[in-house]
Amino acid sequence: MNNLKITLLKDVSFEQFKIFLDSLTVEKESWSLDLQGFKNPKDFYDKITYQSFYPCLLILHENKIVSFINGYSRIVRGKRNLVEISFVVKKEYQRNGLGTKMLIELEKILSKTEYYTQMCGKHFKDNIGSHKAFLKAGYSEAVWESDGVVDNMIWKLKDIK
C-alpha cells in the first residue's frame, strides 16, 4: 500500500474527520466511535485534538482518512494506568495490516508516558480482523471482571512497560 501516512487527529480538519465517520457503512456493525462522554463527534474532535493524554492516530491515503485509533484511560482498581483502545479500518483497506500498524504506533506513543503500563481493547467474537490485528500486535486474550459488557465481546490485553 503506497502513499499511506500516519498522523494525529489534530492534523486533519473536523470536516475530514466527519467525512470519514459518515463514510463508514458495514464497519459500523463491528465498531462505533466511543464518544467517551462527549455530546457528538464535533465535541469529541474539539476536545481530543487539544488533549495530548488521549492520543488519536489516523492513517491517511491520498489525504483521506482510512483508519482511526484512539486510546483513553480506564480506571482499574483505583489506578489510571490502563488505556482502552478503539480502532477501525475502512472496509476497502482491511486485510492490509493497518489495524496492527495502528496498535503498534499507539503503543509506541503510550509507552513513552509515565502513566500507562497496559493497553486493552475489546471486539465482537465474530470480528476476525480485529482478533488477528490484536494478536499480531502482541496482545493476549484477557478475562475481565464483570462490568456490564455483553457476552459477545472478547477482551485483549498487552503490557507496554
Image: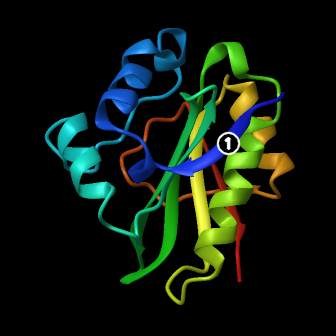
- Looking at the image, which residue is at 39% across and 52% down? 10
Q: Position of residue 50 (x, y in %)?
A: 29, 63
Q: Percent from the top left, x then y, of residue 83?
A: 50, 66
Evaluate whether residue 98 shows in this view: yes
Q: Is residue 142 above or below residue 30?
A: below
Q: Amino acid at mark 1?
A: Lys
**Foreground: 10 or 149?**
10
Q: Nearer the viewer, residue 139 or 147?
A: 139
| Up/down of 8 relative to 55, above or below | above
Picture quarter with the N terminus: top right
Which class describes the residues within 10 Å of circle 1: few (<14), some (14-19), or many (20+)? few
- Quadrant the C terminus occupies: bottom right
Q: Is residue 150 left or right of residue 49?
A: right
Residue identifier under label 1: 5
Query: Percent from the top left, x then y, of residue 63?
Result: 56, 29
Residue 141 at least partly seen: no
Above or below for 36 versus 96: below
Horizontally, residue 123 falls left or right of residue 147, namely: right
Instruction: Give coordinates of residue 118: x percent, y percent.
Output: 61, 73
Tell me if 47 is positioned left or right of 88 in this view. Answer: left
Instruction: Tell me which corner region of the image, top left, top right, bottom left or bottom right, holds residue 88.
Output: top right
Q: Say which quarter of the image contains residue 126.
A: top right
